[in-house]
Image: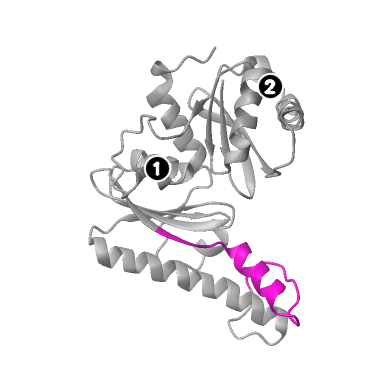
Amino acid sequence: MLLVIDIGNTNIVFGVYKGDELVNHWRLSTVLNKTVEEYAILLSSLLRFEKILLDEIECAIISCVVPPLLFSFESLCCKYVGVKPIIVEPGIKTGMSIMYENPQEVGADRIVNAVAAYETKKTAHIVVDFGTATTFDYITPKGEYVGGAIAPGIMISLEALWERASKLPRVELIKPKEIIGRNTVGAMQAGIIYGYISLVDGIVKRMKDKVKTNPYVIATGGLAGLIYKDSETIDEVDEFLTLKGLKILYEKNKDFHRFR
């Protein structure tokens, strides 16, 4: 079995593949001060709950945008799982040309998503990832990663509004009944949700106007479904896009890596 780990600023997502099948996945909050042992206990418990033993994990791959946690999860895989993981980092075989001015600046998750999107449909893509930040990445029809845009995530925007405006309450992130709020909570929800839909559609339309290749737009991330329902530009939501990308990168690199 293959263990795939996506370490983000807000969540850590684990997945287990048996062959080409994603047999299970779990999402945990990212906590910087947890020890290797604590994360190992959590992972072991989750696997055991699904009747998967650590001994059944034969290989692993990690994508990480939180540098302090990379060593912890490398150690977890080596010490408790018994495998040396592949790390998504400069030098890994992706099969994709990186056209960024400085390729080392591109977040591992953005490359993983780009590879997954292009390998699924061999055409131009815009990938929108709703994470701590919302990223927009363009891939050419030839499968070249060009670059994109980075915007504050929905939750960052909502928290900033609550923290910086003294009289505004903390509100639940749900779609309001109408665009014109008749109370403060409804007005805040309308501003965040519909404002963010407009942000997404505005950036995607501008990117499409620039590249003129009619890219397929795929969204991922925990809040993608909330925006997709009213978006004019998102073609598809794939909540497992990053895990699929990690599986693809494992296949491209497994013959050049020693897991034991």
Q: Which residues are magenta?
A: 149-175
* Residue 204 magenta-highlighted: no
> Which residue is situated farthest in the top direction here?
260
Residue drawn 47% across the image and 30% down it: 247
* Residue 167 magenta-highlighted: yes
Instruction: State the SS at label 2.
Output: loop
Assess disc 1: are there few (<14), some (14-19) or many (≥20) residues with their C-alpha within 10 Å of its C-alpha.
Answer: few
Residue drawn 50% across the image and 68% down it: 230
Residue drawn 52% across the image and 70% down it: 196
Dot in front, 2 or 1: 1
Q: Which residue is mark 1?
A: 104
Q: Is residue 124 left or right of residue 150?
A: left
88 is higher (above) or lower (below) than 205: above
Q: How many marks?
A: 2
Residue drawn 75% across the image and 27% down it: 37
Q: Nearer the viewer, residue 46 or 151?
A: 151
Which label number is shown at residue 49? Answer: none
Q: Which residue is mark 2?
A: 52
Residues at circles 2 and 1 in contact by the CB criterion of under 8 Å = no
For the residues labelled 2 and 1, the Cα–Cα distance comes to 36 Å
- Which of the 4 quarters of the picture holds residue 163? bottom right
Q: Is residue 150 left or right of residue 212?
A: right
